[in-house]
Amino acid sequence: MKQKQRLKNVPPWRAEGHLNRVVKAMPPSGIRKFFDLVSEMEGAISLGVGEPDFVTPWHVREACIYSLESGNTHYTSNKGMPELREAICDSVRSDLGLDYNPSEQILITTGVSEAVDLAFRATLNPGDEAIVPEPCYVAYAPDVVLAGGVARAVPTRLEVEFRLRPEDVSAAVTNKSRVLLLSYPNNPTGAIMTRSDLEELADVVVENDLLVVSDEVYAKLTYSGSHASFAQLEGMQERTVILNGLSKSHAMTGWRIGYALGDPDLVGAMTKIHQYTMLCAPTMAQVAAIEAMQKGDEEMVHMRHEYNLRRRMFVSGLNRIGLDCFEPKGAFYAFPSVRSWGLSSEEFAERLLKEQKVAVVPGNVFGQSGEGFLRCSYATSREELIEALDRMEIFLSGL
Amino acid sequence: MNEILEILSENAKATPAEIAALIGRPEAAVASEIQELEESGVIRKYITLINWEKLDKSYVFAVLELKVALQRKTGYDAVAERIANFSEVESVRLISGDHDLSVTVRGESMKDIAYFVAEKIAPLEGVQSTCTHFILKSYKEHGVFLTDKPKPQRLVITP
């Protein structure tokens, strides 16, 4: 038979049969449905955006432009530019009082997202468990699974303002537990953990020999006191890997610059994966990040102040119109309860969008314990927030 | 900095109720503090920033740089006050550098302003020289862009 005829009889090729079964079994993000609904709608106000509404400060953008003009378009060291690593270690020393050696205890990553992935891949063996407090950012559990681990969700509750309690962790620990994830200030709840909240966790962490992966990307957006990190606790720096970045603090989401700080062996293991998968974070973004770390404090403080003004106005507005909301002390999210309105999170969010054109994200997207809540981002203009509150009030009066 | 002034400096229309919600203080307290700021002269006036260039008929603006002879006792103040009194004058500032006073004037036409400078400012006692710069285009005033730019777009929903 001629080749042409032989090929004619071959059934059509389907990619599906060639996909990795872990990836295939992974459910798509629950946000997708709302994204499609909002995208098609004219005149909708979106409180569903998880990034600053500010544009990156001009001097940061300008530093990047100058660097490009000068021809800095090459790879950097796998770990990231030395100047950036030093600038970050300096700022961490002044913010948290912790010393990290810029040559072996820090890795610059392509966004905190990459750092989360690396932290799990560098530490989990097949079947190892990571304890993931919920509600939380949507990527942690999938990242654990992609690393071959098992994500064990731990619900947090409104009654304790969505802080993680040691008994919650104890209840989830098994002999396979290796990692405890912390993400405070929290997306989606806006909850924070104070130093004493964290101290209460230390015993259960040590007893079960857990490594703490602490995503602190909203650390600078703390409105009550200063941010506390688990790594600051006596003897806990070694067993904590801090993940952070410039996305939220310096309005630099699209630049994709994050970093991991921790034990040299652990950061070394993460760097090994990073060098084979990412090689290095984008050079132009690293240059911009240096400028932001060294000279960006003033704008950062200004943006935090503006978020804080909106936070007060928006949260008191939610409570006024009948959406009960605890005081979120960090990030830029309010997490009001809809339980007393007789609708599920999804029903509420879908009807609010269709009837009054206000987009919020239903809390259950961030884990089962988020059911009965809505994530409302106040990283949007004051005018839009006021208009959104008006529309929500009209919606509630029709329920 | 005073939080109330910060908010009003960006939006003169902000009401005491709106400001109170933003800073988490009672509305009555905010209202009375604003009144005090008005009475003590910290708040001079609530004005509107207008992009005149958007209108068919616009005003003409010019910046004058003046060299002024220092007066015994009154320094620059007396001549600055005299200049400030003209209704054509929008701002008068004492500046460092090659010149002494920087004056912004508004007129109906370039000719208008040229006559005003020649007849009213240049002959003033103490004014030694004038240099008139007509403003051709204004890009930013009081921290606000006057050029229309598309707003950078964010994705409508992100995790």
Image (cartoon, coloured by chain):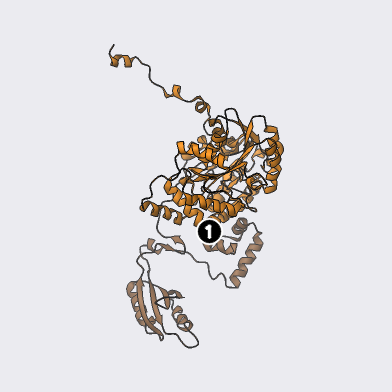
Chain colours: A orange, B brown
Residue A63 position, x and y percent, is: 42, 55
Q: Which residue is mark 1?
A: A298
Location of residue A365 by image quarter: top right
| Image quarter of residue A178 | top right
Q: Which residue is at 41% across, 86% downward?
A: B125
**Residue most toward the bottom?**
B72
Q: Chain of mark 1?
A: A
- The x and y percentages for residue A173 are 67, 32
Of residues A344 and A20, which is closer to you in this image? A20
Q: Where does residue A326 sit, x and y in percent of width and height?
A: 66, 46
Q: Check disc 1 and report its element: helix, strand or loop.
A: helix
The structure residue drawn at horizontal position 43% and vertical position 77%, both measured from the top left corner, is B101
On screen, B159 above or below B72?
above
Is residue B76 visible in the rendered structure shown here?
yes
Residue A6, compared with residue A87, is above or below; it is above
Specify few, some or many for label 1: CA neighbours under 10 Å numbering under 14, 14-19, or 20 or more: few
Name the outermost residue toward the left.
Answer: A2
Q: How many marks?
A: 1
Position of B60 compared to A368: left or right? left
Residue at (37%, 66%) from the top-left corner? B58
- Residue in view at x 36 percent, y 16 percent: A10
Residue sitting nearer the eye, A75 or A157? A75
Q: Is residue A236 above or below residue A152?
A: below
> Where's residue A194, x and y in %?
67, 48
Of residue A145 and residue A372, the one placed in the foreground of this image is A145
The image quadrant that residue B38 belongs to is bottom right
Going by the numbered disc 1, the residue's amino acid type is: Glu
